[in-house]
Image (cartoon, rainbow, N blue to C red):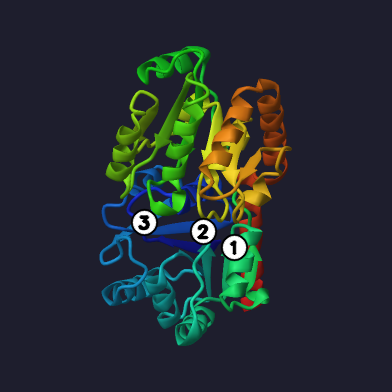
Amino acid sequence: MIHVVQVLTDTNIGGAGKYLLNYLQNFDRSSFRVTVILPENSQLAEPVKACDGVTLEEVPYMADQSYNKHCVAVLKELFIKIKPDILHTHACLSARIAGRKSKVPVILATRHCIEPLSRGIKALIKGFANTFLCDYYIAVSQAVVQNLTDSGIKPDKIKLVNNGVVPVRTISEDECRTLREAYHIQEDDTVFGVFARLEPVKGHKYFIKAARQYLKEESKAKFLIVGNGSLESVLKEQVARYGLEEHVIFTGFVPDTAPLLNITDITVISSESEAMSLAILEAMSLGKPSIATAVGGNTELIENDISGLLTGYADSASLASAMLRLANNPTLSQKLGQCAKEQYERNFTVERMVSRLEELYREVLRNDH
């Protein structure tokens, strides 16, 4: 039995948290024993506790920060006590330092985003630390592989494991109708949805600008903004300034986004940077078409005009044009959604991701011995 310890610093449930939960709900319990380490008061705690065969440890000094010297000390003692075979970290420098100090056999780190590149002496120091503190890096897309390579990580230390998601459950027509009524969505409204943290990198302001442009030509539409974050008040002010309150709907944080995705006709990703969007993958699993910025891993998920539409970042006019094109051409929209679903079933199921990850666990342990 291989003991894998997963460490995540997030107090909210973002992409890394969903990635972790997808693994915990589907891992091979006959071959692996899993301990999860989270900060105190994380929203992930309850979903993790609900996963069979998973041990949860909640530790101080870790909430939403990669490094804390007190956290290193706590984690070192914990690792010595629980003796992991593999330490798998998610943006937690403290855990990697503690893993080295406590002589954990193999340390892995998954990079879930495209990180800015450091320059000069800072880049050298960061590169040395990354090399010394981690045996292998897991990239969730080819775009992240390139980002890691550009950061100075040697290619033989990088392993590609594409994201995968559980297919989003389909809800009934009656449930869809009830939910649409709750949000005052008319039967003939086209529903566009952004499912993302309300943070600058996600480009919501361009989605709102595109909505204003769209509504100059077509009035029957609603624009869902699903999630919370630091820009919530700023984005609501923008909507009010444009007079779009009747059309743009802020749902806040929603623990289960499946019903909202069911009533969304077209998913939009307006991000400046994406490693591999779980929102796109979930839309693909339902056969929903997506419009996304041509950045990072988005271009690995969407082939323009085949399985979705790609636009430039910060190009609200192009985004509005793409939205109008799909809203006014349901045949094309359906075709793109079907192609996206077929691609999901071939390459991005949760079973495929978990299988590849567990193959990697076995491989790195063999290399260690």
Instruction: Name the residue beneath numbered marker 1.
Output: 144
Tag nearer the camera, 2 or 3? 2
The Cα atoms of the two marked residues, 2 and 3, are separated by: 13 Å
Residue 211, percent across and down? Answer: 46, 33
Query: Residue at 64% of width from left, 78% of height from top?
Result: 154
Q: Is residue 312 visible?
A: yes
Give the residue number, with chain letter if any, for mark 2.
Answer: 112
- Looking at this view, is 248 or 242 the one in front? 242
> At label 2, which amino acid type do we have?
His
Residue at the limit of the structure toward the front, as seen here: 216
Q: Is residue 358 visible?
A: no
Q: Relative to 234, is 144 above or below?
A: below
User: The residue under label 1 is which amino acid type?
Assistant: Val
Question: To which quarter of the image does residue 2 belong?
Answer: bottom right
Kindly report which numbered mark, 1 or 3, lies closer to the viewer in this rendering: 1
The answer to whether the residue labelled 2 contacts the one labelled 1, judged by CB atoms less than 8 Å apart, is yes
Q: Position of residue 355 (x, y in %)?
A: 65, 52
Q: Amino acid at mark 3?
A: Asp
In the image, what residue occupies the spot 54% across and 28% down?
A: 169
For the residue carrying disc 1, how many other residues have a C-alpha within 10 Å: few (<14), some (14-19), or many (20+)? many
For numbered disc 1, what is the local secondary structure? Answer: helix
Quick one: quadrant of the C terminus?
Answer: bottom right
Q: CA distance from mark 1 to mark 3?
A: 20 Å
Say which quadrant the N terminus sits in. Answer: bottom right
Q: CA distance from mark 2 to mark 1?
A: 8 Å
Q: Earlier in the sequence, mark 2 or mark 1?
A: 2
Q: Is residue 212 left or right of residue 336?
A: left
**Disc 2 residue crowd, few under 14, some 14–19, many 20+, Cα 10 Å:** many
**Coordinates of residue 314 in the picture (x, y in percent):** 51, 49
Residue of label 3: 10
> What x and y, as percent, mark residue 51?
44, 44
Q: Secondary structure at mark 3?
A: loop
